[in-house]
Amino acid sequence: MLTKPQAKHLKEGSAAEDAAADFLQQKGLKLIARNFRCPHGEIDLIMQDGKTLVFIEVRLRSSNSFGGAAMSITPSKEQKLKRSAERYMQIHGECACRFDAILMQTINTGAIEWVHNAF
């Protein structure tokens, strides 16, 4: 069976999520889930930081032309992430949580900005 080649932006996004997960694990967080999907949207990474569940949005931008990685997290995106997190906790149980963001300009530089309590 032949598989369809993955688009470049999807490969880069997956590599960014790999880099973010590795970075956060080195900082002591434990990976719980990747790419949790529900009707409200998708959460890139779900990790445990002590007793806190952390929902993480990974953003990769190749330029700052449109405001960069941080500006790409719109109010609409925040709402989708919050609703998706609510759904996750309905399934897996309520607990203390926060929303973080991992911002990257490129994967090659290794420069990662970790924003705690991003929204």
Image (tube, helix red, strand yellow):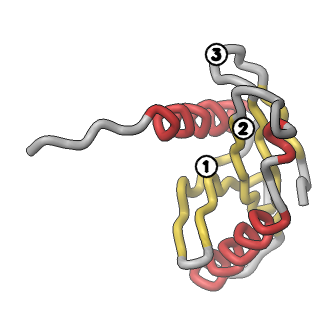
Point 61% across, 53% down: residue: 44
Horizontally, residue 81 falls left or right of residue 99, namely left
Mark 2: secondary structure:
helix
Mark 1: amino acid: Leu
Instruction: Locate the N terminus by quadrant.
Output: top left
Q: Nearer the viewer, residue 64 or 42?
A: 64
Q: Report which residue position mark 1 lands on.
A: 31
- Give the distance between the C-alpha atoms of the residues marked 1 and 3, in whole angstroms: 23 Å
Mark 1: secondary structure:
strand
Counting labels gives 3
* Label 1 or label 3, whichever comes before in sequence order: 1
Res 58 quadrant in image? top right
Characterize the local packing of mark 2: few (<14), some (14-19) or many (20 or more) Cα atoms within 10 angstroms.
some
Res 29 quadrant in image? top right
Point 78% across, 37% down: residue: 103
Instruction: Locate the C terminus by quadrant.
Output: bottom right
For the residues bearing labels 2 and 1, Cβ distance under 8 angstroms: yes
Q: Report which residue position mark 3 lands on.
A: 108
Characterize the local packing of mark 1: few (<14), some (14-19) or many (20 or more) Cα atoms within 10 angstroms.
some
Q: Report which residue position mark 2 lands on.
A: 24
Which numbered mark, 3 or 2, is in the foreground of this view? 3
